Image (cartoon, rainbow, N blue to C red):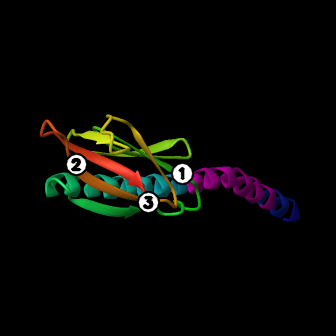
Amino acid sequence: MSAEMIFVTLLVILVIISLIPLINNRMDAASRTDELGNARMLAENVAEAINKVYAGGNGHSIYLHMPANINGKDFTVVVNSTGSYVKIDGMAGKSFTVPYKVSGSKSLKNDEIVLFNGHSYIITNVEDSNGYKWIVITST
């Protein structure tokens, strides 16, 4: 009876030890999914602010503050003429917008703007001399 008990105990220990890496992988995947979901929500918030400014017309502006981190990790937000993209830990959350011209300064040069965590920005709708609407994103 004691030999069977030792065999069963060793078998149970082996099964538990083999499950530990699987559990760790699942927990890491859940954490990365949460990070990507939060990145996507931030991309949606940035795109929504840009769309509101664009719809508001010439001179309309919105103040936007980037969070310090996403789940304790640094990130960057890239805004271009098609949308906003949040890059975090090798992943990207994205949100598309109506195509428009975007600039990082009043010089109205079509750019790709990078927004950094913990910084504040002003998003403004500016009309150029030809009547085209521009989205200008500047740091405060």
Residue at the outermost right position: 2
The segment highlighted magenta reads 9-28
Question: Which residue in the protein does label 3 denote?
Answer: 140
Q: Indicate which disc, 1 or 2, sits on the residue closer to the N terminus.
A: 1
> Which is closer to the viewer, label 1 or label 2?
2
Q: Which residue is under mark 2?
A: 126
Relative horizontal placement of residue 5, taking residue 118 as reference (left or right):
right
Task: Name the magenta segment's main secondary structure.
Answer: helix
Toward the front, the furthest residue is: 129
Image quadrant for the C terminus?
bottom left
Determine the residue positioned at 87% across, 65% down.
Answer: 2
Q: Which amino acid type is shown beneath numbered disc 3?
A: Thr
Distance in Å between CA atoms under marks 3 and 1: 36 Å
Return the residue nearer the eye: 80 or 57: 57
Residue 61 at least partly seen: yes
Amino acid type at image mark 2: Val
What separation in Å lies between label 1 and label 2 (alpha carbons)? Answer: 43 Å
Viewer-nearest of discs 3 and 1: 3
Number of numbered discs overlaid on the protein picture: 3
Mark 3 / mark 2, whichever is N-terminal: 2
Instruction: Pick the quarter of the image with the N terminus.
Output: bottom right
> Relative to the observer, which residue lies in front, 27 or 126?
126
What residue sits right under mark 1 in the picture?
29
